[in-house]
Amino acid sequence: MAFQEYSNEHVAKNREEIEGHIREILRLIGEDPRREGLLETPARVARMYEEIFAGYSANPHDILGVTFDEDHEELVIVKDIVYYSQCEHHMAPFFGKAHIGYIPSGKVAGLSKLARLVDAVTRKLQVQERITSEIADIMEEVLQPHGTMVVVEGEHMCMCSRGVRKSGSNTVTSAVRGEFRVNAALRSEFLSLLKQ
């Protein structure tokens, strides 16, 4: 299956083994994996893993590989790209929105490619800080723009549903490259456009 269909080839190949481990986890937490409501749970979890860990089967650099020559060297922003990821510390979900801005240097990516890039980077065990940097670094490597700025917002279940249990708290991270790093007015323009 193609990445666009959110499939993880590694999980599909190891589905039977993953199902066995899920059955064992159910037993170890005090459940009966033979209980009617849980009989299909291991298979459902394995299929879910194919989707939520599809980033392991994607090459994010390839996603931006198709570009268009365009004489546009002004700010391009795709904002409010919804993402879902899994915290690598607790394997708990976190989710939010990514905002990507860049100044092209002769080539632009299709707008949907930026959303696919976010999926490729987030659909694996991650931390929000790395997601933010990876998106910016891949944009820089593949598109070679004059500058890139990425802002990622996230709500982390490992912080909301366990531990300190502070639901509604939001984490914001940013990565700044090229012109955005040296031009405060450009950073301000990007941030003000995110509020619109």
Image (cartoon, grey):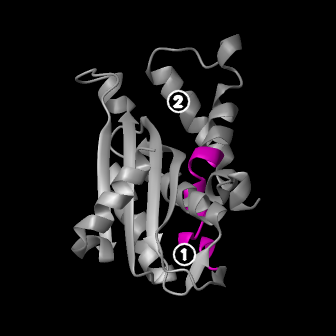
- SS category of the residue bearing label 1: helix
Q: Residue at x 63, y 64 (%)?
A: 111
**Viewer-nearest residue: 131 or 163:** 131
Residue carrying label 1:
61
Q: Marks 1 and 2: in contact by CB < 8 Å?
A: no
**In the drawing, does residue 180 fall left or right of residue 44?**
left
Crowd rating for badge 1 (residues with CA inside 10 Å; few <14, some 14–19, many 20+): some
Check residue 61 for magenta coloring: yes
Sequence-first tag of 2 and 1 = 2
Q: Is residue 80 above or below residue 177?
A: above
Q: Residue at x 38, y 44 (%)?
A: 153
Q: Is residue 69 above or below residue 126?
A: below
**Viewer-nearest residue: 1 or 27:** 1
Give residue 48's position: percent from left, percent from top.
64, 39
- Quarter of the image for residue 41 reads top right
Q: Residue at x 36, y 22 (%)?
A: 161
Q: Is residue 67 above or below residue 97?
A: below
Can residue 32 be seen?
Answer: yes
- The amino acid marked with disc number 1 is His
**In the drawing, does residue 130 fall left or right of residue 14?**
left
Give residue 122's position: percent from left, percent from top.
49, 53
* Boundaries of the magenta span: 50-65
Check residue 22 for magenta coloring: no
Residue carrying label 2:
24
**Quarter of the figure with the N terminus:** bottom right
Q: CA distance from mark 2 to mark 1?
A: 37 Å
Give residue 139's position: percent from left, percent from top.
46, 73
